[in-house]
């Protein structure tokens, strides 16, 4: 039996355990996936000491540790370096390597409504850690990207790094998108009646993904549906970033449909 888990703070609402337990069950694996609630000031000791003492073979990394964890690892892959965030750690013989699978999760989620974002104009709302991964994935797919954020400086810094445009949220009507991806926490439970987008912005056929998955249908998604936009469910990004984590840790694909069933059951409860 080997131990895996998710490290974050707070962590008790994470749906990753249900998702990975379903994947382990399908392969008859006796590995365990646990929650590790680690405060920011405890992170260095946890990563540099506890992970090998316990030992933990693989970690999912979530808010607020995705950037702060980097100096405590032995190496990170080129995608995590370009994004500036790690959401996956693999412990190979005591050496900890960091990866980012959020960008792969976002890219695969977009395939729900077509192939990918190649040649499309993508507008991303937000410029935090999730936006960095989503924007990186879109740029890798060959999209043109505009990053709109409440704080312009943060949008500009990310846009400069990835070769995108930057602006404030209030200028959204200047950017008619083929694809709109909402990456801020606005609309997340319990503030479920909040949305950053004026419904007049949505046009029939526009592809819209809100990466907030609690609730499954945010106010933004409801309004986009009313305008006959094509919706990519935000939970798909969580699902596919987890699928890629499984591949990194075990060198094989999970039964992703079983992970999805478990995730949807948790989300609906
Ligand atoms: N579906 C998935 O797999 C997945 C994966 C990762 C994250 N997420 C979700 O994505 C969200 C963001 O995560 P993160 O890691 O990027 O967080 P983060 O690094 O803290 O960034 C937060 C972003 O939200 C913006 N924001 C926050 N409150 C706002 C408000 N009231 N009005 C306008 N903008 C606001 C911030 O703008 P400023 O820069 O102006 O502060 C910033 O751009 C969270 O809800 C997280 O659960 C989902």
Image (tube, grey):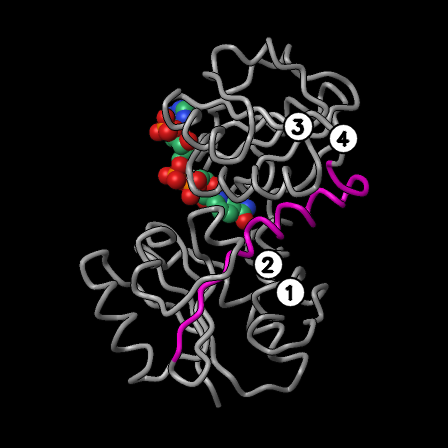
Pointer 4 local density, CA inside 10 Å: few below 14, some 14–19, many at least 20: few
Q: Which residue is mark 3?
A: 144
Disc with the residue nearer the chain's start (4 vs 1): 4
Disc with the residue nearer the chain's start (2 vs 4): 4
Q: Quadrant of residue 129?
A: top left
Measure the alpha-carbon separation of dots 1 and 3: 32 Å
The residue under the point 64% across, 13% down is: 201
Task: Please report contact status of discs 1 and 2: CB closer than 8 Å, yes or no.
Answer: yes
- The part of the chain drawn in magenta is 95-117
Measure the alpha-carbon separation of dots 4 and 1: 31 Å
Position in image of residue 90 (x %, y %): 47, 73
The answer to whether residue 190 of the structure is visible from this angle is no
Residue 80 within the segment the image draws in magenta: no
Disc with the residue nearer the chain's start (3 vs 2): 3
Q: Which residue is mark 2?
A: 263
Tag in front: 4 or 1: 4
Pointer 3 local density, CA inside 10 Å: few below 14, some 14–19, many at least 20: some
* SS at badge 4: loop
């Amino acid at each position: 039996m080997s131990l895996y888990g998710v490290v974050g703070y707070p962590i008790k609402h994470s749906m990753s355990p249900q998702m990975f337990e379903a994947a382990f069950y399908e392969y008859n694996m006796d590995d365990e996936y646990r929650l590790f609630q680690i405060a920011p000031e405890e992170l260095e000791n946890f990563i540099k000491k506890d992970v090998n003492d316990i030992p933990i073979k693989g970690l999912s990394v979530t808010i607020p540790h995705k950037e702060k964890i980097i100096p405590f690892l032995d190496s990170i892959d080129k995608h995590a370096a370009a994004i500036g965030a790690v959401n996956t750690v693999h412990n190979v013989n005591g050496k900890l390597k960091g990866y980012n699978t959020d960008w792969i999760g976002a890219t695969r989620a977009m395939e729900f409504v077509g192939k990918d974002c190649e040649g499309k104009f993508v507008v991303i709302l937000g410029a935090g850690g999730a936006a960095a991964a989503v924007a990186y994935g879109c740029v890798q797919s060959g999209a043109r990207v505009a990053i709109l954020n409440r704080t312009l400086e943060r949008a500009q810094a990310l846009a400069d790094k990835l070769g995108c445009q930057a602006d404030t949220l209030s200028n959204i009507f200047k950017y008619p998108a083929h694809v709109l991806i909402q990456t801020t926490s606005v609309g997340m439970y319990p503030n479920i009646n909040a949305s950053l987008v004026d419904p007049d912005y949505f046009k029939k056929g526009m592809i819209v993904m809100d990466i907030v998955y609690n609730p499954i249908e945010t106010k933004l998604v409801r309004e986009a549906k009313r305008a006959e936009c094509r919706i990519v469910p935000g939970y798909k990004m969580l699902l596919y970033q987890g699928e890629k984590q499984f591949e990194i840790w075990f060198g094989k694909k999970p039964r992703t449909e079983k992970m999805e069933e478990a995730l949807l059951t948790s989300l609906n409860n």
